[in-house]
Amino acid sequence: MIPMAGLILIGMAGCGNNKNKTEPMQTSHKKDPHSYSEPSKAVITHLELSLSVNFDTRKLSGSATYDIQRSADAQELILDTRDLTISKVSLDDDTAGSAFATEIPDDILGTALIIKLKPETQKVTVFYETDPDAAALQWLQPSQTAGGKKPFLFTQSQAILCRTWIPVQDSPGIRFTYNAKIQVPEGYMAVMSAENPTQRSTDGVYTFTQKKAVPAYLMALAAGDFDYHQYDDRTGVYAEPATLKAAVYEFDETRSMLDAAEALYGPYDWGRYDILVLPPSFPFGGMENPCITFATPSIIAGDKSLNSLVAHELAHSWSGNLVTNRTWDDFWLNEGFTVYFERRIMESIYGKEYADMLGVLGYGDLMETLKDMKEAGQDDDTKLKLNLAGRDPDDGMNDVAYEKGWLFLCQLEREAGREAFDAFLKNWFRDFAFKGADTEEFIEYLQANLIEKSGKKFETDPKKWIYEPGLPEGYVAPTSTRLQKMEDMAAAYMSTGVDAVNLSGLSSHEVQYFLRSLPDDLSTAKMAALDQKFNFTERKNSEEAFLWLRLAVINNYADAYPALDRFLTTIGRRKFVKPLFEAMEKNPATRELAREIYTKARPGYHSVTYNTVDGILKWNP
């Protein structure tokens, strides 16, 4: 129950005894600290969404109607909102309006919307509009798109931003089905995390159906000037016309990835699997929205070298979308499993050496993250099981959940044997399908269905991996013969010069590892020699360009600064943006440059990105 102090009451009174009501199906072992909702009393089970998209006012407006299930004593439905303007709430078919209340806003959680229920209430409708600066909504001007002709809208609901565009029970442990009707300007395309159109509507009206229950963070909407290319009966790609040809080539192995995933861990349960290439301000590499992955154009390298991201988002169709972390404290259950699954897909298609390289690169990211977090006094956040109460759950979205989680699962596979571990994972996805799970449930399931069932003595202690900071003693670090050669080549360069370096015919992963293996304290002459021979400053591969530009900042290699400016003003992916601004802020010689670039770049960044960089630069908008 939310305390009533400080509430604003609006509308008509309506309370009573609730008799003969069914008990909610969705209950948590404990309350989600990032949601005001009380699903054990009243929970949403289905959403009917009707919204109009207005690019001029930068607002969505319309209504959300919920089917609810209630306990016998439930007198109110509590929804999460943030910066929404609620005009009216109605119950069932009564259009007169009903009582509701809102709390004083919390900076992280937003505002509880408390709706008084009548004894017979089974449906609730909320009429509302969004704020022009709603955190989940990215409104792009035509100049910020690839085509440059029409504006573009996309949403990013994870982790707790769905409440900024839909009043909802914004907890990953609560799932619901939905239908939607979306009105966009004529000539625009619209898609959601649902069954999607493949042709533009003549009147700008689109209808969507998601028959599988999903949590709020997987609610997604995009509208703009984009078209569709179908690969086959299950896969395809959406992109702006200027990007579509390159995207079609880059992602044409998607069906092979889907086939490989199903061969590993069972049927794909979401109908079609499509990819939407978003404009470059998208803050993440990809977002695993059901039926349609939202992807950054920064992975279009022209040679399919960055397609492990597609495998990762596809894997989320099982780990995350199908079996979901119950709260954001259990985020590793989504991401650690997905990294493991992603690398198994890549191994199936490209071979073990390829997957080994991905593992070593990810391990390098993890070790850097653990080092940084230790120096910042954040050891508790290097545990797999987190305690994020009172904090933004984005604080837990780092390499610990992804790469430490992957290492832990690799350790279990090593002890159980791959065949037994694959059977265990397949059963995990089957037994928890369309449900939330927490870490403690996983430990119990692991003990009963893998460790005890195997009859072996496991040296791996799951609780040390999960509840203790850092990496436990005796863990096995990943290795790659091909990447070890890059480390040797970097050492040879430092001792003998640029003639020792030969990058011809190497994969992007090997080039990336060569750059990672170089020391941070390179001389300007060393930087220039590499740049002259390999033209690193003009690299189109975003991963390689990022690594080179970071070295350029650390070593005051000013010849790369124009490229740094272009990179940061055209790519909004937080993975790249955050460390580059951190490096510029740390180096006194580039602090002023950081602010010059950020002044231009910030208007094109999503709130997820600019909120991070604002903190780094102590920016006062």
Image (cartoon, rainbow, N blue to C red):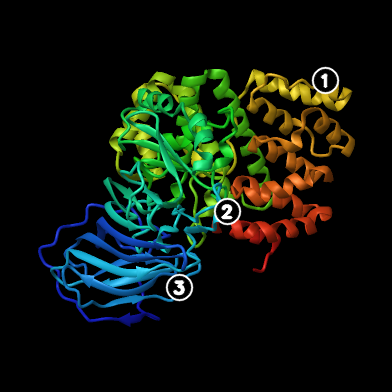
Label 2 SS: helix
Mark 1 and mark 2: Cα distance apart in space: 42 Å
Residue for badge 2 = 144
Identity of the amino acid at label 1? Answer: Ala
Give the mark, 3 or 1, whose residue is nearer the N terminus: 3
**In which quadrant of the rendered image does the N terminus lie?**
bottom left
Q: Residue at x 43, y 22 (%)?
A: 416
Callout 3, which amino acid?
Pro
Q: CA distance from mark 3 to mark 2?
A: 32 Å
Circles 1 and 2 in contact, beta carbons < 8 Å: no
| Residue bearing mark 3 | 105
Q: Is residue 98 left or right of residue 571?
A: left
Three-letter code, disc 2? Gln
Q: Are marks 3 and 1 in contact (CB under 8 Å)?
A: no
> Which quadrant holds the C terminus?
bottom right
Residue 500's disc is 1
Image-based side of 565 in relation to 23, left or right: right
- Label 2, residues with CA under 10 Å away: few <14, some 14-19, many ≥20: many
Q: Earlier in the sequence, mark 1 or mark 2?
A: 2
Residue 236 drawn at (x, y percent) = 40, 34
Name the one closer to the observer, 131 or 142.
142
Observer-nearest of 261 and 381 = 261
Q: Residue at x 64, y 45 (%)?
A: 576
Q: Is residue 77 above or below residue 455?
A: below
Please indicate, yes or no, whether residue 475 appears anywhere in the rendered image.
no
Mark 3, other Cα within 10 Å: few <14 / some 14–19 / many ≥20: few
Residue 542, image x, y percentages: 64, 38
Between tags 3 and 1, which lies in front?
Answer: 1
**Observer-nearest of 369 and 124:** 124
